Image (cartoon, coloured by chain):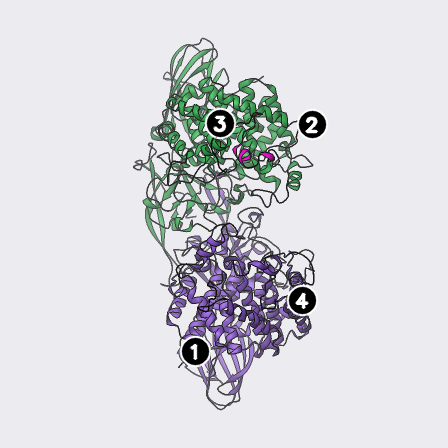
Chain colours: A green, B purple
Amino acid sequence: MRKRIRPSAVTNVEVVNTLFGRYADLVADRIIPYQWDILNDRIADAEKSWCVENFRIAAGEKQGRHHGAVFGDTDAYKWLETVAFCIENHTGAEYKPVAEGLIELISRAQKPDGYLNTWYTIEHPDKCWTNLIEGHEMYSAGHLIEAGVAWYRATGERSLLDIGVRFADLIEKEFGPDGGRREGYPGHPEIELALVKLHEVTGNEKYLSLARWFIDMRGREPNYFIRERKANEGEYLFFDRYETAYAQAHMPPAEQETAEGHAVRAMYLFSAMADISERCGDEALRAACIRLWKSTTQRRMYITGGIGSSAFLERFTTDYDLPNDRMYCESCASVGLMMFGCRMAALTGEAGYYDEVERALCNTVLGGISMTGDHYFYVNPLEVWPDSCMSLTSMEHVKPVRQRWFDVACCPTNIARTLASLGSYIFSEDGESLFVNMLISSRISTRVSGGNLSLYLHSSFVQDGEVRMEVEKEGAEPAFIRLRVPPYYKMGELSINGKAILPEVDRGYTVIPVLEQGSFVITMKGRVVPRFFAAKEEVRADAGKVAVMLGPYVYCLEETDNGANLANVFVSPDSAIEIAQPEKPLPGDLPSLVFEGMRLSRSIVEEDALYGTPGFEMSPMKLKAVPYCLWGNREPGEMLVWMKALV
Amino acid sequence: MRKRIRPSAVTNVEVVNTLFGRYADLVADRIIPYQWDILNDRIADAEKSWCVENFRIAAGEKQGRHHGAVFGDTDAYKWLETVAFCIENHTGAEYKPVAEGLIELISRAQKPDGYLNTWYTIEHPDKCWTNLIEGHEMYSAGHLIEAGVAWYRATGERSLLDIGVRFADLIEKEFGPDGGRREGYPGHPEIELALVKLHEVTGNEKYLSLARWFIDMRGREPNYFIRERKANEGEYLFFDRYETAYAQAHMPPAEQETAEGHAVRAMYLFSAMADISERCGDEALRAACIRLWKSTTQRRMYITGGIGSSAFLERFTTDYDLPNDRMYCESCASVGLMMFGCRMAALTGEAGYYDEVERALCNTVLGGISMTGDHYFYVNPLEVWPDSCMSLTSMEHVKPVRQRWFDVACCPTNIARTLASLGSYIFSEDGESLFVNMLISSRISTRVSGGNLSLYLHSSFVQDGEVRMEVEKEGAEPAFIRLRVPPYYKMGELSINGKAILPEVDRGYTVIPVLEQGSFVITMKGRVVPRFFAAKEEVRADAGKVAVMLGPYVYCLEETDNGANLANVFVSPDSAIEIAQPEKPLPGDLPSLVFEGMRLSRSIVEEDALYGTPGFEMSPMKLKAVPYCLWGNREPGEMLVWMKALV
């Protein structure tokens, strides 16, 4: 039997990459304290969170109504998960007392039977479990459990885990196949993947069974959600119209062919499906996961790893429908794509899934946060004309500058917990091999084949094409480093201690044997060159256009470098792309890219007309592109990823 | 003093143009009976109207709740106005008894004090006049009055007019500058222009004064709408957020610089402003109208005469923001643009305003109705990919095929009344001159300079460049034909009875004197050639694109002629455009246009990738374009106006 692949523990990894290291440091330095201020409504010019306040009211320590989103509790849970990761990775110990105070407050807000949801407790204690479509009780429980697991792993303390266990036990009493329990499953998947983690940390099989039951029941006829809507007719909170595909409940997950509905819901569900297939050997779920991954990444994903083409309902639409200016591409959905991709790699052992994990991370997820850590994008467009992003129009969801907070604020805490646990995305392990999934400079120290193995990954591939791994191996048993050589990297030579090797490639991983004890330097020489990309011709929004990438980084034009009216910029896909200095004050050391282009300086002959005789005049211009993940950190203005090509 | 210009009476005109004549005939043949069935909820597969039902309930003749839009009554009024026009133009006498029955029903639904609005009467009789922002009481009154005026003009009967007068008198008692009357003005302008008509037909000055007072009060500080919202907090029907600019109440109309807010509201307000300026000689309103016309047509209008770039709130956005696929461009807004333009021409005597009246009529307004008369567009995009127009997405407002009816159904009846009164858009008069505003073949017989003048306008300019006017003049006094020679027409020779003349041009009108009694044949020879157009370079959505027009008609590509994926079509603005046979079974005799283009048949080198190495392959193809106003009458599919140009 194949060894099980697990993400490496956050505690063992230090991210030192100039870009990601900077953001990883920001988490403890700035993001955690800033978000704590937000959760306590202490930032004057930001949307109010109400999060801590709601727990106080639910605990009976304050009077008042619930405010904010029905799932607002999860911001606290994701914040705690982030603190846990920072304690685990040795950057955030100082926040432990504050976090413990919050955990105690949460504990006091939990009902004696284990129920925990401030909205229902404050507003409708009589209506628990009656509105699974909208109520988010199990979604919130899932984030509570994930936070509890992270806290336990980071501190060894069960305080938060036990709150989650009590709630999970209540849910397991309420829902299930027999004993007169309730039918139904979550309107927003999340608890399923959390229950898998809870099973892992507690060893209790019932959590895995419940997760599997939720997946098995989902979308079966007669559809639970349709029955629930009938029962609640006229009493819904926000869905006056509803289709079950919105929540991926239009058919059993194992039968689904295409990524449908709300993009975050889809990613969290698919992640749980991959988890359960991996744990339980469920072949139908595995096949479904492969189909749904392809549907997502080969037909419904932006070049930035953004997903969710429709702002209304934040959802998938149809194949190749990828408009660049008005889409949603919520940051959380790309976090979800990373989660799904890692699990697919664990399920299959295939390196290729990390192509899209990396794409989402290096573009949409990193782009979701400002270089100062305290401003965020929720929506991640590939083309912005700030003038048109007006409030009270169809474009008001698109923000041309990052915001301090949101009335629905799932994304900032989701980005934070992802950055804080980056090590577990970069590395994974199966006991015999250390998987190096992304070439992001880091140090890891872990146990492989019964002995300690430490690895310092130094990747300067963007600068000089070199990837260097300093390995220290203590154990005597043979171990392997499985290195994902990304598709944008043209490998020249691979050597160990200066001696060239020709390693085997297994499921996309270059397998480097480390057979003996001792120190080794593995060097990979090669090239990463900036390149133009086009989209498949079915993608109407990108027809006749090109984007430019350097390695995993999508680049974009900003008005501050290139002037206004970027829609009039043309570029030849044969232009030479020059690597230039990083733009100040952008973080990291990713170069800017410079290439020749043309600007349509005039379109019509007439002076004053809106429409007139075509008289296209083009002027040559130097274009400067910066990494998409760093856009909007300087002077606000237009931004553009897909440039018109001179075809 | 300048003579006042008035639209010619509908009764005097017969439209014989092969295209418009066909649609004008459709009104009585098909549209009136079809819409009557709709208003009575007799069409099984259409959205329900509830319109007649609501009047029955309000009249106390049936029990039940109000259904449908709060302004649903206006569908009945516009239907009656359409019937009136058809009685007046001698095509619809057969509908008089049915219409009289409806008028009697309306009369029974009117309250003893004159109040008439089925929504308030049925649902909230206690809340009249408390929600001017949303209530549409005065909007509905306006359409009632317009219908009453049309009915009176068509039949000489005061039945419907008196209902309107009673309501207008009540409104005049309720609202006004003194005597303890209410403050406030309509949330949706319309009554203002109707009151001007009522003044005209009754001679009663108080209606003109009230209209003027509504305009004068609008947007003054302290803003009435802001006060009303405070008073009604939490009790609004559909606006949870509101800005006064939505209803053009952000500042006094005379001070407004740009076309803002809901496009139909804007057009109806601006039309009333032009009316009042013309009647009262108000120079500030006149200057505002000129500014607002320019703002609308020079910076915020589609090449099709569509207006309203944001689907959310159906509103104007910002200069040059004219996205082609997701906008609103409601049919009613283009009807409103026609109304505004005609009034501007009457106010200024300038022919040029008809350039945009004609643009709106020949493209968006005519395009809003199927060639069968019983299917309608509400939203009029310039680019449609049916697959992406999915329900429960941001694109669900865009319908790739015309619909039988709508839950909010202002457009079908608005198109109908416009087509039924087309003669008054084609011709206008000032007692001395007959203005020929659009070269749409028609006959008119009217009185000019104290004598009868009949004119048969035969315009075959699209086919052979000729416009021929057979004039029969009875009176002895000199008369003038003021002919708008449209900008797309390259005039060669103008002659009377075969004798070339070189007439004066006054404010854009070619002034042809008809000095004597007798018969004259005026012939204009010239050319209209199909042409490519581009948009000003500020219009980002059209950057590097061209559209093709023949005279006033915008053309488009349809999938049925050109295959799918029109986004990949390129065309050179230097291509020769060939005039081809009209496409069967499209109505009228507008030719198809054929030109060489290229199709991007492949974009990337890789077989299976979504994004890959650019490898643009172009194949030459013949493109066939049909008039935009006739799109969607054959096989459903993609449609495109703005084609990528080979720049």
For label 4, the SS is helix
CA gap, disc 2 to disc 4? 59 Å
On screen, residue B636 versus residue B204, left or right, reads right
Query: Any magenta on residue B249?
Result: no
Marks 2 and 4 share the same chain? no
Q: In this view of the protein, which residue sits in the foreground, B133 or A257? A: B133
What's drawn in magenta, residue-wise? A105-126
Q: Earlier in the sequence, mark 2 or mark 3?
A: 3
Name the residue tied to disc 1. Answer: B510
Q: In this view of the protein, which residue sits in the foreground, A488 or A99? A: A99
Where is the C terminus of chain B found, in terms of image quarters?
A: bottom left
Chain of the residue under label 4:
B
Q: Name the kind of residue labelled 1 in the image.
A: Thr
Q: Which mark is residue A180?
A: 2
Q: Name the kind of residue labelled 2 in the image.
A: Gly
Chain of the residue under label 2:
A
Q: Is residue A622 above or below residue B464?
A: above
Name the residue tied to disc 3. Answer: A106
Crowding at label 1, few (<14), some or many (≥20) Cα neighbours within 10 Å?
many
What is the number of callouts on the image?
Answer: 4
On screen, residue A633 versus residue A324, left or right, reads left
Chain of the residue under label 1:
B
Q: Is residue B399 visible?
A: yes
Name the residue tied to disc 4. Answer: B33
Where is the N terminus of chain B found, in terms of image quarters?
A: bottom left
CA gap, disc 2 to disc 1? 88 Å
Position in image of residue B368 (x %, y %): 56, 61
Query: Any magenta on residue A124?
Result: yes
**Could you tell me if the residues under marks 1 and 4 are in contact, i.e. CB atoms within 8 Å?**
no
CA gap, disc 1 to disc 4? 41 Å
Q: Name the kind of residue labelled 3 in the image.
A: Ile
